[in-house]
Image (cartoon, rainbow, N blue to C red):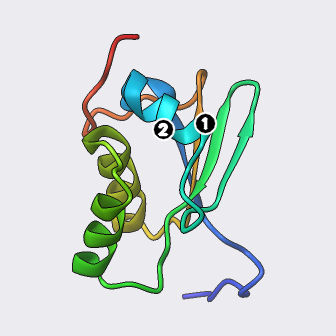
């Protein structure tokens, strides 16, 4: 198996339909502990990989993150992605819940 150099990082391409309206409002002013870049179509969100799963969930919960966004970030980590691209035209993922807003 070929190992990718460290400068390459995987990201999850995900539709914004997998986060709630409350999540989208929360992303407008995220806490300092979370790296978020916004654009006119959505967000790039960092899914910290230096924490174990329990610490990760505890951190997200302590930030007041909603279950939709939390589920997307957990799904990304399960697939070795450290970034999530949330986009209105992003990929719809059957394993994740959908929200109408």
Q: Residue at coordinates 49% horizontally, 73% vertically from top-left?
A: 48
Determine which quarter of the picture holds residue 86. Answer: top right
Is 82 above or below relative to 12? below
Q: Residue furthest top?
A: 101
Is 7 above or below relative to 78? below
Pick the residue in front: 68 or 31.
31
- The tally of labels here is 2
Please state, as top left, top right, bottom left or bottom right, where the N terminus lies in the image. Answer: bottom right
Q: Residue at coordinates 41% horizontally, 22% vertically from top-left?
A: 21
Pick the residue in front: 14 or 68.
68
Indicate the secondary structure of the residue bearing disc 1: helix
In this rendering, position of residue 59 left or right of residue 16: left
Image location of residue 14, percent across then percent down: 50, 38
Q: Residue at coordinates 49% horizontally, 65% vertically from top-left?
A: 47
- Tag 1 near tag 2, CB within 8 Å: yes
Disc 1 packing (10 Å; few <14; some 14–19; many ≥20): few
Image location of residue 19, percent across then percent down: 39, 32
In this rendering, position of residue 100 left or right of residue 30: left
Determine which quarter of the picture holds residue 5. Answer: bottom right
Is 98 above or below relative to 32? above
Q: Residue at coordinates 39% horizontally, 28% vertically from top-left?
A: 22
- The residue that label 1 is drawn on is 28
Image location of residue 92, percent across then percent down: 42, 28
Pick the residue in front: 58 or 42.
58
- The residue that label 2 is drawn on is 26
In this rendering, position of residue 3 left or right of residue 80: right
Pick the residue in front: 28 or 46.
28
Structural distance between the alpha carbons of marks 1 and 2? 5 Å
Determine which quarter of the picture holds residue 101. Answer: top left
Image location of residue 55, percent across then percent down: 29, 80
């Amino acid at each position: 198996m070929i190992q990718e150099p460290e400068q390459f990082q995987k990201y999850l391409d995900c539709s914004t339909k997998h986060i709630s309206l409350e999540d989208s409002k929360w992303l407008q002013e995220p806490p300092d502990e979370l790296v978020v870049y916004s654009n006119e179509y959505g967000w790039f969100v960092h899914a910290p990989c230096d924490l174990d799963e329990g610490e990760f969930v505890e951190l997200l919960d302590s930030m007041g993150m909603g279950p939709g966004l939390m589920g997307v970030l957990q799904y990304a980590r399960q697939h070795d992605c450290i970034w999530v691209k949330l986009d209105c035209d992003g990929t719809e993922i059957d394993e994740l819940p959908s929200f109408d807003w």
